[in-house]
Amino acid sequence: MKKLMTLIALLVWSVSFAEPPSDYTSIDAHARNTPDRFAQSVEKLAAYLTEPAENDFEKVRSFYVWLSKNIAYDVDLFRRYQPGASLEIGPDDVLKQGKAVCQGYSDLFNALCDQAGIESRMIPGYSKGFANRNRTDFSTADHAWNSVLIEGQWYLLDATWGAGGLDEKMEYKAQFNEQYFLSSPEVFIKDHMPEQPMWQLLDCPVSIQAFASGEEAIQQALAQDKNCMSFREQIAEFDALPPADRELQAAKDAYQFNSDNHLVMARGYMDYAHHIMSGIKRQMKSREEIEQGVQAQEEALGYLKKAKNVLDKIRKGAKMEKDFVNKNIKNSEENLRAMKAVLQG
């Protein structure tokens, strides 16, 4: 048994990951010279961009470079956008319009990866970019980027910042930026803090307090072995959850990591309540079905009240969420009274 355990340990420690290529000259030229006709759909674009690629690194690079050249930052939408809000703009919309904010870049990148059979995630979080380099308010996530799985290893990239940025006049300037393509986690964390700490891709994650304090505090945090975990194990455990439970867990992780972000937890509770209520039958034909409906409605109501309690901590803003929760609490209580009246009758 001792020899077997030694062999297992040796096998574990022998695991290694492929290194990204050092030269992307050929695939970069291919991506930059993509004819417009291939950008009419995600499927056609992904097929063209990956055609000469020799590995997944080059496929991902082709997507990153194409996005930097062909998708402009939507300054008008940025001015109107409320941080933390979800936009009803899909990858096809971004292709058609040729512009987007960070969510659009991330969604389109995910869609291209999906067509290529590469796993990619959009990572919401806090940033230190133009006009907010010295920000002190981290109560709401304001940015999104991607983590992509290549040959068993997770990597970070930001296609939005890779395409350019805003100047001092708040005008968009397109400029390819190499820095945010498969950056090391230690570099990425200087201006990108994910809501869920596991997506720092650091076994000893940096706290939101260190991130807020600046680069010196971040470097000190990186040098310390505190709050360590295996981010790979955490991602695997997270992925094993059912979809609705994953969304709720993501909100719980984000809120536990940064208790100033009340909105992320409130929306997590609201979404989970909606998930429960979507399973309640509109037409109930038996006493058993009504009893199941009561049970589900009571559970959903509990999550709505949790959402209300969290939203009450937000003194200014979140009016839409507060109105939504109050309306749904009222409707849920009315539904419960109606179902219970039938059972008692």
Image (cartoon, grey):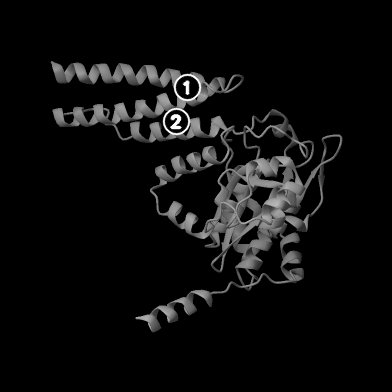
Name the residue beneath numbered marker 2: 270
Name the residue beneath numbered marker 1: 324
Q: Residue furthest bottom?
A: 3
- Badge 1: residue crowd in 10 Å (few <14, some 14–19, many ≥20): some
Give 139 or 104, whichever is nearer the viewer.
139
**Residue 165 image-quadrant placement:** top right
Quarter of the picture holding the C terminus: top left
Q: Position of residue 272 (x, y in %)?
A: 41, 35
Left or right: 320 in relation to 337: right
Left or right: 47 in relation to 22: left
Quarter of the picture holding the N terminus: bottom left
Amino acid type at mark 1: Phe
Give 296 or 164, whichever is nearer the viewer.
296
Q: Position of residue 64 (x, y in %)?
A: 69, 57
- Badge 2: residue crowd in 10 Å (few <14, some 14–19, many ≥20): many
Amino acid type at mark 2: Met
Q: Is residue 241 visible?
A: yes
**Residue 115 image-quadrant placement:** bottom right
Q: Residue furthest right?
A: 168
The residue sitting at 30% across, 27% down in the picture is 297
Q: Secondary structure at mark 1?
A: helix
Left or right: 16 in relation to 21: left
Q: Position of residue 315 (x, y in %)?
A: 59, 19
| Disc number placed over residue 131 in the picture, else none | none
Label 2 or label 1, whichever comes before in sequence order: 2
Asked if disc 2 and disc 1 are in contact, CB closer than 8 Å, the reply is: yes
